[in-house]
């Protein structure tokens, strides 16, 4: 049961994170006020990384900025390690 709740949580937070990422892409191309990278990274670290990482490459946003994607991949590694530990040792 807990796994279902976790999957729903990750899906919901990932969708919200992708919406923020797409909004930032739109604002970047139209030279408007942007969403802070800190906000995008927050959504990644709280679980949105699983949907935001592929979206980053699909919409071609922030995928050339080395400092940005290092933090994104660090969030991915942390989540995968945490999920692996939770699944194997609980």
Image (cartoon, rainbow, N blue to C red):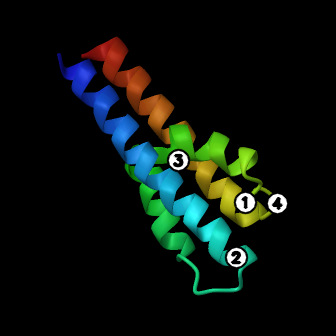
Which image quadrant is residue 69 in? bottom right
Give the mark nearest the N terminus, 3 or 2.
2
Q: Which residue is mark 4?
A: 64
Separation (CA) of disc 2 from disc 4:
14 Å
Camera-near label (1 vs 4) is 1
Q: Within 10 angstroms of label 3, few (less than 14), some, or many (20 or more) residues? A: many
Q: What whole-number distance in Å separates the C-alpha atoms at marks 3 and 4? A: 17 Å
Secondary structure beneath label 4? loop
Asked whether the beta carbons under mark 2 and mark 1 sit within 8 Å of each other, the answer is yes
Front one among 90 and 2:
2
Q: Please tell me which residue is depicted at 50% across the width and 71% down the height of the picture.
A: 38
SS at mark 1? Answer: loop
- How far is mark 2 from mark 1, CA to CA? 9 Å
Q: How many residues crowd around disc 1 within 10 Å: few (fewer than 14), some, or many (20 or more)?
A: some
Residue at the (56%, 66%) spot, across then down: 23
Q: CA distance from mark 1 to mark 3?
A: 17 Å
- SS class, disc 3: helix
Residue 70 versus residue 4 in the image, above or below = below
Q: Secondary structure at mark 2?
A: helix
Q: Residue furthest top?
A: 88
| Residue on which the image places disc 2 | 28
Q: Earlier in the sequence, mark 1 or mark 3?
A: 1
Q: Residue at label 1?
A: 61
For label 4, count other residues whose C-alpha is less than 10 Å away and answer few (under 14), some (14-19) or many (20+): few
Q: Is residue 81 above or below residue 78?
A: above
Residues at circles 3 and 4 in contact by the CB criterion of under 8 Å: no
In front: label 3 or label 4: 4
Residue underneath mark 3? 75
Q: Could you tell whether 60 is left or right of 55 in the image?
A: right
Q: Position of residue 29 (x, y in %)?
A: 74, 75
Measure how far apart labels 1 and 4 are at the Cα level: 8 Å
């Amino acid at each position: 049961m807990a796994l279902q709740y976790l999957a729903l949580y990750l899906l919901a937070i990932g969708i919200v994170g992708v919406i923020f990422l797409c909004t930032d892409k739109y604002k970047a191309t139209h030279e408007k006020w942007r969403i802070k990278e800190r906000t995008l990274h927050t959504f990644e670290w709280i679980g949105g990384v699983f949907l935001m990482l592929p979206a980053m490459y699909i919409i071609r946003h922030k995928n050339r900025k080395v400092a940005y994607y290092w933090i994104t991949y660090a969030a991915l590694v942390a989540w995968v390690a945490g999920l692996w530990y939770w699944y194997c040792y609980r």
